[in-house]
Image (cartoon, rainbow, N blue to C red):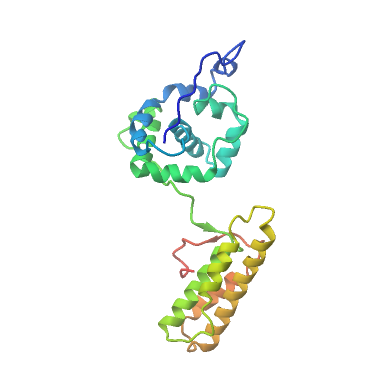
Amino acid sequence: MLPKQASASQLSFYSTFEEQLSHRHPLYILANQIKWGIFEEAFSALYSEEGRPAKPIRLMVSLLMLKHVRNLSDESVVEQWFENIYYQYFSGEKTYVCGVPCEPSELVHFRNRIGAEGIELIFKESIRVNGKDGGEHEATTDTTVQEKNITYPTDNKLYRKIIKKCVAIAWKESIELRQSYTRTVKKLLMEQRFRNHPKNKGRARKADRKVKTIAGRLVRELERKLTPGLHQDTIGLFKKVLMQKKAVTKFTACTSRTPNV
C-alpha cells in the first residue's frame, strides 16, 4: 500500500531544508532535473490498496540511482543516506531524517516489484538528464540489478552446495551413503537464521561448524567408494574449498573455468 503524502508546510521557523543546501551541488541539481512524477505514475499500479504502507516510490527510486551513481552496495547506500543530507534531499525529504530510510533487503523487494521494465525506465530518465550525452544514437548501460555472484571462502553456502553435490553424485553412481544428512542440514539451516542477534550468534557458529564437518564426511566417503579416476576433479575442488581459510581471496561461484560447486 502506498503511504500518505506528508505535509511540507512550515518545515522550519527560519529557513527551509532546501535553502540550507548548496545549489551548486551535483545531487541538488540532479534532483531538480529528474521528472519524478513518471515513476509515481508507472509504479503506483504495482501497489495494493490494503496492507502496511510502503516506502515512498521516489525514495526507493532515488536509492537505486544513488547506488549505481556512487557504485555502492545496498547496505552502504542505506547507511550513507542516514549521514548525507544531499542524499536525503535527492530522495525528496523536506527535513533532515535521523535514521536509515529502509532495510537493505527492501531494495531487493522493490527491484523485484518493478522488474526489468521498471529498471529500464529509471535508466531512460538517467540518460535524459545527461543533456548532450543523452542525445547520442547509441548508449551502453549496465542493466545488472543484482549483486554479483561472489562467495567468500568461508561462506557456509559453499558447504551446503558440497553436501548437495555429494548426494547427487552418490545417487548417480549408485553409491549407498552411510547418511544423506538431508534432515540434519535442514535443521542446521534453521539454527543459522537471525545470526546477527546476540542470542543466536553462538548457535549459528556451532551450526556452521557442523555443516562443514558433514561436508567433509561426505567428501571423504565418496573418495573411498568412488571408482578411481571418477569425479576426481570435482572431489579435488570440494577438498580445496573445505581447506580454505579467511585469508584466501574470494571464490567466484559463477566462473565457468571451474566445475560447479
Q: Residue at x 60, y 55 (%)?
A: 194
Would you say residue 143 is visible in this rendering? no
Q: Is residue 84 left or right of residue 145?
A: right
Q: Is residue 246 left or right of residue 150?
A: right
Task: Name, please, the residue furthest toward the top.
Answer: 14
Task: Name, please, the residue furthest toward the front.
Answer: 50
State whether residue 129 is above or below residue 256. above
Q: Is residue 113 left or right of residue 105?
A: left
Would you say residue 183 is visible in this rendering? yes
State whether residue 23 is above or below residue 229. above
Q: Position of residue 104 (x, y in %)?
A: 54, 43
Q: Quadrant of residue 256?
A: bottom left
Q: Residue at x 57, y 22 (%)?
A: 95
Q: Residue at x 47, y 62 (%)?
A: 255
Q: Quadrant of residue 38?
A: top left
Q: Residue at x 49, y 25 (%)?
A: 92
Q: Position of residue 96 (x, y in %)?
A: 60, 25
State the residue in front, 87 or 203: 203
Where's the N terminus, which quadrant? top left
Q: Quadrant of residue 72?
A: top right
Q: Position of residue 124 (x, y in %)?
A: 35, 34
Q: How many labels sit on residues?
A: 0
Task: Name, please, the residue furthest toward the left.
Answer: 137
Q: Position of residue 36 (x, y in %)?
A: 40, 27
